[in-house]
């Protein structure tokens, strides 16, 4: 069966696999855009498989295997809605397991980090100003999400992979109907209790960006359904965006123990306006270099928040709307797996310049270059502090089948 599979992949290789073909226009119809995105994702998946099959053939002839990622080791990350109930429950249970295991971060560093789950949150808080709007934004979050997936597997016996949330789907169905947020036992929990008369959000001011006004959403209070209804958010807030403008940080500091409920405010407007299937496809097809790609993704400079901001802010709540503490919402990792998938597809359209070498990254080492800093290089190291792993270099995080990685998306 394996041999047949490889033969098939090789056959694909000899036809036209070299690069997935990008469609040359972006449909504004959400269903049509979603279909194109799926086709492009599938083509990327097939191209990677064909590459690995070819590498295996070369290795068989030459005895030299380049890289440790092989077809038989390749892991597939899938969309949340495509998992079976049992697969969803296995993931949820592993997250709960991580939330029940004692932290590794020393209490002297972060007294509020009570669990292995919190270790990841503390590290993200710690590094926020050197991992967003920086040259390492995408590579850092790729490594971080992978370490989280690995912790679920190695420490909590999870045998699946990190699922992702395709924002283009929930933009069509509405967030409350999405399998990610429908509040069922197989979701990441649903909306927060509705708090009426909540003013609009006014984003940006707290991080030095032009203001963007967003509706505050259909929730606002504690999440009351699904697996994470009783979870304790322990760290932060550090800079929670507040309705009406401004942001809030715990006066005792972001690492203090500040147990509280998980809050959400599902906001379809934000999902549809900033992270619909057309915006995803545009982000993949229009930018020709990494600077353009990541700028569009993060929505810098105009009245946009990009698909990255669109996903984050459509979840709403606390810590979802706190730039520093956002991984405290377990849905963070499904969101960032999707960010990683979008990068992966974009990279596959021209891997030699987008998934390797100096042209694969752009940006400095500090948030919006404040304070001014040198350009990041592919030799810069990225790490997740006490959460997990050891430092790696950005150049080892540019390709999902090289360095420590061996995964694709379907
Ligand atoms: C993408 O691949 C999946 C899995 O092989 C398949 O079920 C689906 O129909 C494909 N989608 C498109 C649009 O080709
Ligand atoms: C934050 O990062 C610094 C520098 O790497 C490190 O010394 C410190 O222990 C980290 N704190 C936490 C809470 O991770
Ligand atoms: C949350 O706590 C309530 C009250 O103790 C309990 O009835 C409910 O089953 C718990 N939910 C979960 C998902 O653990
Ligand atoms: C889809 O996203 C794009 C870019 O973010 C936006 O211009 C467009 O208005 C969105 N479509 C809808 C229906 O909101
Ligand atoms: C990265 O390190 C390699 C040697 O490991 C060196 O050849 C290269 O010039 C370095 N690149 C940058 C941008 O510092
Ligand atoms: Cu982040």
Image (cartoon, helix red, strand yellow):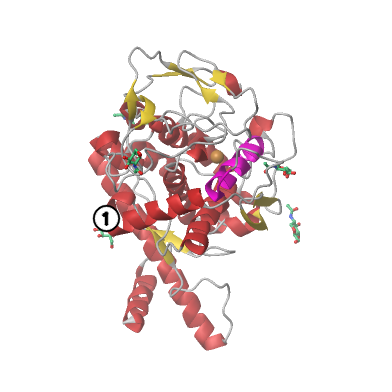
The residue indicated by pointer 1 is 85
Disc 1 packing (10 Å; few <14; some 14–19; many ≥20): some
Q: Is residue 158 magenta?
A: no
x then y, percent, for residue 280: 38, 40
Q: In this view of the protein, can residue 27 be seen by the observer?
A: no
The answer to whether 152 appears left or right of 221 in the picture is right
- Residue 310's place in the image compared with 105, above or below, is above
x then y, percent, for residue 202: 48, 17
Question: Which quarter of the picture shows residue 230?
Answer: top left
Q: Secondary structure at mark 1?
A: helix
Question: Which quarter of the picture shows residue 370?
Answer: top right
The answer to whether 90 appears left or right of 148 in the picture is left
Q: Is residue 129 magenta?
A: yes
Foreground pick, 28 / 151: 151
- Numbered range of the magenta stretch: 114-131
Residue that appears at 39% across and 54% down: 93
x then y, percent, for residue 295: 53, 35
Residue that appears at 69% across and 39% down: 365
* Quadrant (top left/top right/bottom left/bottom right) for the N terminus: bottom left
The answer to whether 316 appears left or right of 175 in the picture is right
- Residue 153's place in the image compared with 50, above or below, is above
Ligand 4 falls in quadrant: top left
Foreground pick, 109 / 150: 109
* Quadrant (top left/top right/bottom left/bottom right) for the C terminus: bottom left
């Amino acid at each position: 069966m394996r041999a047949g599979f490889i033969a098939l992949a090789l056959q694909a290789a000899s036809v036209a696999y070299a690069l997935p073909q990008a469609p040359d226009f972006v449909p504004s119809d959400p269903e049509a855009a979603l279909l194109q995105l799926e086709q492009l994702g599938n083509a990327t998946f097939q191209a990677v498989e064909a590459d690995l099959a070819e590498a295996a053939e070369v290795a068989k002839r030459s005895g030299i295997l380049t890289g440790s990622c092989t077809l038989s080791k390749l892991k597939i990350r899938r969309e949340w809605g495509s998992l079976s109930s049992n697969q969803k429950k296995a993931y949820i249970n592993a997250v709960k397991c991580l939330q029940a295991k004692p932290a590794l971060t020393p209490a002297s560093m972060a007294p509020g980090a009570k669990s292995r789950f919190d270790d990841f949150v503390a590290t993200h808080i710690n590094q926020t100003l050197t991992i967003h709007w920086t040259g390492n934004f995408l590579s850092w979050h790729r490594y971080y999400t992978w370490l989280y997936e690995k912790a679920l597997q190695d420490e909590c016996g999870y045998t699946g992979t990190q699922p992702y949330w395709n924002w283009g789907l929930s933009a069509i169905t509405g967030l409350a109907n999405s399998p990610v947020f429908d509040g069922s036992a197989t979701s990441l929990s649903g909306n927060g209790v509705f708090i009426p008369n909540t003013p609009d959000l006014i984003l940006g001011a707290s991080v030095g960006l032009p203001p963007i006004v967003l509706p505050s959403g259909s929730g606002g209070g504690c999440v009351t359904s699904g697996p994470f209804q009783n979870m304790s958010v322990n760290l932060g807030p550090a800079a929670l965006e507040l309705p009406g403008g401004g942001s809030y940080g715990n006066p005792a500091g972001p690492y203090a123990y500040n147990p509280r409920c998980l809050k959400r405010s599902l906001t379809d407007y934000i999902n549809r306006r900033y992270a619909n299937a057309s915006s995803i496809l545009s982000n993949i097809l229009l930018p020709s270099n990494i600077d353009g790609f990541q700028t569009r993704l993060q929505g810098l400079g105009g009245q946009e928040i990009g698909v990255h901001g669109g996903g984050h802010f459509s979840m709403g709540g606390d810590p979802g709307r706190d730039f520093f503490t956002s991984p405290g919402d377990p849905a963070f990792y499904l969101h960032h797996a999707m960010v990683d998938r979008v990068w992966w597809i974009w990279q596959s359209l021209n891997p030699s310049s987008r998934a390797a070498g100096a042209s694969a990254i752009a940006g400095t080492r500090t948030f919006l270059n404040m304070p001014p800093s040198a350009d990041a290089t592919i030799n810069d190291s990225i790490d997740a502090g006490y959460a997990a792993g050891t430092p790696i270099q950005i150049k080892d995080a540019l390709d999902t089948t090289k360095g420590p990685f061996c995964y694709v998306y379907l």
